[in-house]
Image (cartoon, helix red, strand yellow):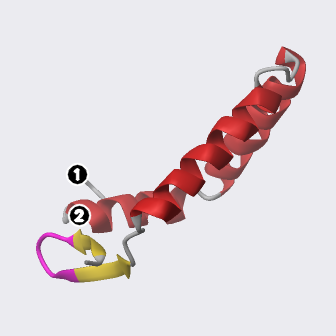
Amino acid sequence: MAIATINPTTETLKTFDSLTDAEILTKLEQAQHAFKYYRRTPMTQRSEWLQAVAKILEQEKEQFGKLITLEMGKPLQE
């Protein structure tokens, strides 16, 4: 069964294939493995990553705003 991102007032925006149980377990194992390394990451490095993400969000805020409102089915002004 596919998972859909929809605009409730108009249409399906995108569909995603669902994962099998085995694929979900693999993803969870990958996340657990990544966390073992991430939790040892110094706070200064984490801060740099978050600042980089914030910069991207700021630069692309209009695009993200349009996408989010499209998914919510509301005009951007609201």
What numbered label is drawn on residue 75? 2
From this viewpoint, which residue is outermost toward the front?
Answer: 22
* Image quadrant where one finds the N terminus: bottom left
Q: Secondary structure under badge 2?
A: loop
Q: Are marks 1 and 2 in contact (CB under 8 Å)?
A: yes
- Residue 15 appears left or right of 35: left
Q: Is residue 8 magenta?
A: yes
Q: Is residue 61 magenta?
A: no
Residue drawn at (73%, 39%), measured in percent from left and top?
33
Q: Secondary structure under badge 1?
A: loop
Count of marks placed on residues? 2
Q: Quadrant of residue 47?
A: top right
Q: Residues within 10 Å of mark 1 (few under 14, many from 20)?
A: few
- Name the residue that disc number 1 marks: 78
From this viewpoint, which residue is outermost toward the left?
Answer: 9
- Residue 32 appears left or right of 2: right
Q: Quadrant of residue 15?
A: bottom left
What numbered label is drawn on residue 7? none
Q: Residues within 10 Å of mark 2 (few under 14, many from 20)?
A: few
Which region is colored magenta? 7-11
What is the x, y in percent for residue 29? 62, 45
Instruction: Tell me which amino acid carries mark 2.
Output: Pro
What is the x, y in percent for residue 36? 76, 28
Q: Quadrant of residue 37?
A: top right
Q: Main secondary structure of the magenta part?
A: loop
